[in-house]
Image (cartoon, grey):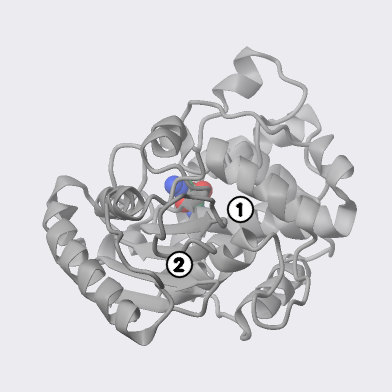
Amino acid sequence: MVQGIANWSTEQSREWLQSYVDDWVSFYRKHTGEGSVAEYIPQLATADPDALGITIIGRNGIKVSSGDVDLPFTIQSISKVISFIVACMDRGVSYMLDRVDVEPTGEAFNSIMHLEMKQVRKPLNPFVNAGAITVTSTLEGKTSDEKMESIFALLEKLLGYRPALNIDVYESERDSSMRNRAIGYYLLETGFLESDMNTTLETYFKQCSIEITVQDLARIGLILANDGEDVETNEEIIPRPIARITKALMLTCGMYDASGKFATYVGIPAKSGVSGGIIGAVPPRVREEVLPFMEGCGIGVYGPALDDNGNSVSGIRLLRHIASQWDLSIF
Ligand code: DON
């Protein structure tokens, strides 16, 4: 484990952390060949399978960025974190938790098995597609563009700029959306949707196609780590109870059917997407020794080669290594 320095907030220590992360990124880039890029959305299949990049931003202002950090990618399922927060802020937490549960499924992200087989009263969590599409149906607005407005408004507050849609990915996603349409029809039949099904699905495809960078993910992760407050201005961007529920869901359901392993071996609230992005929120932690990013940090990772669970194969290995070296686990 990396330790033995009195203060990890100086420029010299930043350079030291940077050289560690540079080494780790080059090492784990070799593992990208163990996964493959998502192909069920044709446009995602054009990503460079060997790409790997990471940005870590600390509450102490230290930022470390390494690898392919300038490659934009679509947010995909990480948008489910944003839409859930927006819905909770607009509708209230209890309204939303009456409509989606907070239980892990242990199933693939696009499974509806539990809904059908267990006859549950509501989708099991907002990060599986059935739950996410239900959440999207609660967003305010009649058209998909109106519904997207509240997502963009929150992203603008979190990032300081308004990200754009990747139209090619949006069209590709919309045109290859058989499974999500099946989920949409199931939710319609069971009465879970609060808006027109086509408008809801169109909004869902758009939210997944927002283009971001690892730096953006690290910034959002940092605000979540800081219980919803901007670390620089102290402005509350996400109400604390909503930030906390979101982190609990990220820890228990954020990496789909690999969430238990990720919680065990990495131990930080995180959420993945099929384009290869991962957002991590590392809260402040108490340790006897002085460690990097003890005051908390946000992490953004991009590595489009995925494992069987749909999570970035080298991104997870890289995060696991950093978490063990710097003792980032919340446990
Ligand atoms: O629902 C879909 O198919 C995608 N647009 C989002 C899925 C996703 O990112 C799942 N993540 N691991």
- Label number found at residue 80: 1
Q: How far apart are marks 1 and 2 (CA)?
A: 13 Å
Question: Farthest top residue?
Answer: 118
- Residue 148: tell me if it is visible: yes
Residue 106 lies, with reference to residue 250, above or below; the image says above
Which residue is rendered at x = 57% and y = 80% of the image? 163
- Residue 306, percent from left and from top: 29, 49
Q: In screen coordinates, is 192 left or right of 251?
A: right
Snapshot quadrant of residue 158 = bottom right
> What secondary structure is marked by label 2?
strand
Kindly identify which numbered label has been placed on residue 74. Answer: 2
**73 up-or-down from 255: above or below:** below
- Disc number placed over residue 275 in the picture, else none: none
Q: How crowded is mark 1: few (under 14 residues within 10 Å), some or many (20 or more)?
A: many
Q: Earlier in the sequence, mark 1 or mark 2?
A: 2
- Residue drawn at point x = 52 percent, y = 75 percent: 60
Q: Which of 159 and 310 is in front in this view?
A: 159
- Judged from the image, the secondary structure of the residue bearing numbered disc 1 is helix
Q: Residue at x 42, y 78 (%)?
A: 63
Front position in the image: 121 or 261: 261
